Image (cartoon, rainbow, N blue to C red):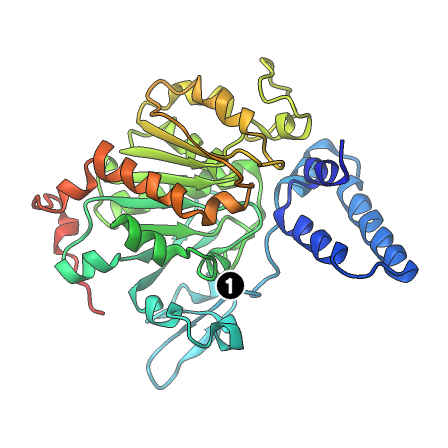
Amino acid sequence: MTEKEYLDRLFYNLETWEELEKMQGEEMTPWKRLRHAFKWIAKVCFILCPPAPNLIIRKVAFHPPKHCQYYFLIGGEPNKRRQFFDAKSARESINLTICLPHLLLPEFKNSDVAVQLLRTEVHLITSSNGDTLMAVYIRCEKSCRYKKSAPYILLFAQPNSSDVGSCMLTDPNLVDIADFLQCDLMAFDYSGFGLSTGTPTEKNVYQNIDAVYQYLIKEMKAQPNEIILIGFSMGTAVAIHLASREKVAGLILIAPFTSLLRVLGRKPHSSRTCCLDQFSSIDKASSVLCRTLICHGVEDVTVSINHSAALQSRFPNATKPFYLDKATHQGIYSARKMWDRVQQFLFHELGCSKKWNDPVKTKRAFVNCNF
């Protein structure tokens, strides 16, 4: 087993490996090697102490960005605007807007993200565990141009090391995805991620996506057959959980995995699920009845493509999977060929393109786009 494979297996964290690759590109002096060794010893101690299995698994599974590293909120009357650094404190405010401090950096000088933010709406949602969740609803460009809601809403479940703010700075970002797929999009932060309150656990993130789904149904007047779930990495387990319980329109999985311990143990086809395992998507796949598309990178060493193969055999209504050569775990997300396949899935297999010409029969048709 190579060093890279070992670290990916132990920490299941994309950002960690990026840091290591950066260090390998530098001249490794004895001092840098010692500092690097102490850094990893500290991380191992953090994960293994206290030696409680559930706590260890939680530390391996969740790596939220630093609080307010990527975004915060601004709200209030025009002449009394103030900043908010958690979702709960912003609940009573009006005119909430997401603010991305990274847009002030030179590399974002010519970025169109600031303009894209004009099509985002901030929503604060209460999860069943009492946590206040930060969510954004994005209207695609076609929705605003046609002055009606898109025929489908993408409910996006993010990975284990990002938040709504960082997802607005990726390539593609959330607005890019909505525009390219011609769907409105709802994204949210799990408990303990971004500005959402609480602590991330397997149970909590399942309750989180259920709360956002119910919010779309009850508050935004969406219908279950108008909602398409899309998950990336850890978000695939969250999306599969909801899809196994609700009759949604479709499911898109990017770099999915069978279960957490099957990733760490490199045994995606294991028939038995350990009692300590979490995010066991393999046990829920057979209950997912909607049309399902799986996308995976062939060179993914974080989550082997064999996980997708195992899941593919369990989904009763899966379309042909899309496996991309030379794509890694993170690289698959930014690959244009992958998004072309997702667009084809939406337009031709789910009929998104055709539905734009049909009248929207729900109350969402009367939502006004004031942008």
| Residue located at (70% from left, 57% from top) | 22
Which residue is located at x 32 percent, y 47 percent?
215
Q: In which quadrant is the C terminus drawn?
A: bottom left
| Rendered residue at 90%/61% (across/down) | 31
Residue 355 visible, this orientation? yes
Judge by depth and name the residue closer to the eye, 51 or 101.
Answer: 101
Q: Is residue 206 left or right of residue 10?
A: left
Query: Relative to residue 314, is residue 354 drawn left or right?
Result: left
Q: Position of residue 279 (x, y in %)?
A: 55, 31
Residue at the disc numbered 1: 86
Judge whether 61 appears above or below 74 on screen: above
Relative vertical location of residue 287 with respect to residue 83 in this rendering, above or below = above
Tally of marks: 1
What percent of the width, then of the height, locates residue 335? 44, 47
State the residue at coordinates (19%, 56%). 143
Does the rendering let one see residue 280?
no
Q: What amino acid is found at the position of numbered circle 1 in the picture?
A: Asp
Compared across the picture, whether 27 is left or right of 336 comes to right
As helix, strand or loop, the secondary structure at mark 1 comes to: loop
Residue 189 picture location, percent across and down: 47, 52
For the N terminus, the image quarter is: top right
Query: From the viewer's perspective, is 276 left or right of 2?
Result: left
Whether 42 is drawn above or below 325: the answer is below
Q: Position of residue 173 (x, y in %)?
A: 41, 57
